[in-house]
Image (cartoon, rainbow, N blue to C red):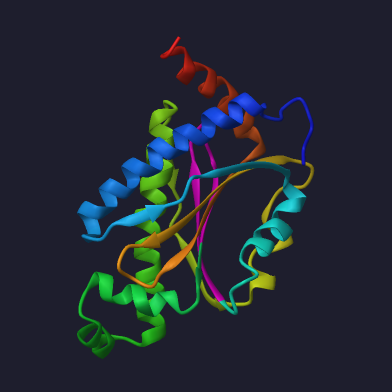
Amino acid sequence: MDQSQDAISADEKEILQEIMNIAFGKAAADLAEVINIFVILSVPHVEMFNAQELPEYLKSQVSGYDTISIVEQNFWGDFKGSAFMIFDAAAGRELISIFGEEGEAIALQSMDALEKETLMEVGNILIGACVGKLAELLGDAVTYSPPRVITDNAPSDAIQANTFEENSSAIVLKTVFCFNERNVEGFLFLVTSHESIVWLKKALATFMEQYE
């Protein structure tokens, strides 16, 4: 754990967790309108790490899966970083039925391509809604890179060690999600960059001023 002067305090962590609760609750409501299925998000968990510890932490969180599928998407603004949506690999096929008739779609393209396309679409919606709402509540607007999808990966290879900058800190915002009435669940991790932490501390203070 990072204990530098940039580390967020216990109070700031609590505020951030509450903002995430608000943001993810709104995101779930938005998603229900878009895909006509309710997404259940767990109470968010906030941790601060040295960036070099992140790959091992993320791997430990998904070690219970035999194989995994990952949707990775970067976002930029004052609040910037990377989002990782991680499923059990079997979830991709289950998710296909959310977005249309499986038989008709498979006739047009391979299962592998269809699975990646479906995961990308779900990732775009879920990550965009959660990150967008969180940034909005903190007075920021973000842009996104196109998502990257990796299917049928081993949990031990979940996140490469060179993904994050050396000697920097990062905040991990983790929630567990599941699609109601579907056998699909996974993790959403938001990893902010080191440069975002100073801004984040100020944004949290500004947010709390509304209630003082």
Magenta segment range?
68-85
Image quarter in which the C terminus is found: top left
Question: At x 63% / y 77%, what residue is drawn?
Answer: 154
* Residue 136 as seen in the image, left or right of residue 15: left
In percent of width and height, residue 119 lies at 40, 68
Q: Nearer the viewer, residue 122 or 145?
A: 122
Whether 134 is drawn above or below 95: the answer is above
In percent of width and height, residue 90 lies at 46, 79
In percent of width and height, residue 52 lies at 76, 51
* Residue 60 as seen in the image, left or right of residue 19: right
Q: Nearer the viewer, residue 29 or 144?
A: 29
Question: At x 72% / y 47%, what residue is drawn?
Answer: 51
Q: Residue furthest bottom?
A: 107
Examine the rendering and report whether any part of residue 198 can be seen.
no
Answer with the quarter of the image where residue 161 lies. Answer: bottom right
Q: Is residue 34 magenta?
A: no
In percent of width and height, residue 55 lies at 70, 58
Q: Main secondary structure of the magenta part?
A: strand
Answer with the quarter of the image where residue 94 lies. Answer: bottom left
Q: Nearer the viewer, residue 9 or 140?
A: 9
Question: At x 60% / y 31%, what residue is drawn?
Answer: 13
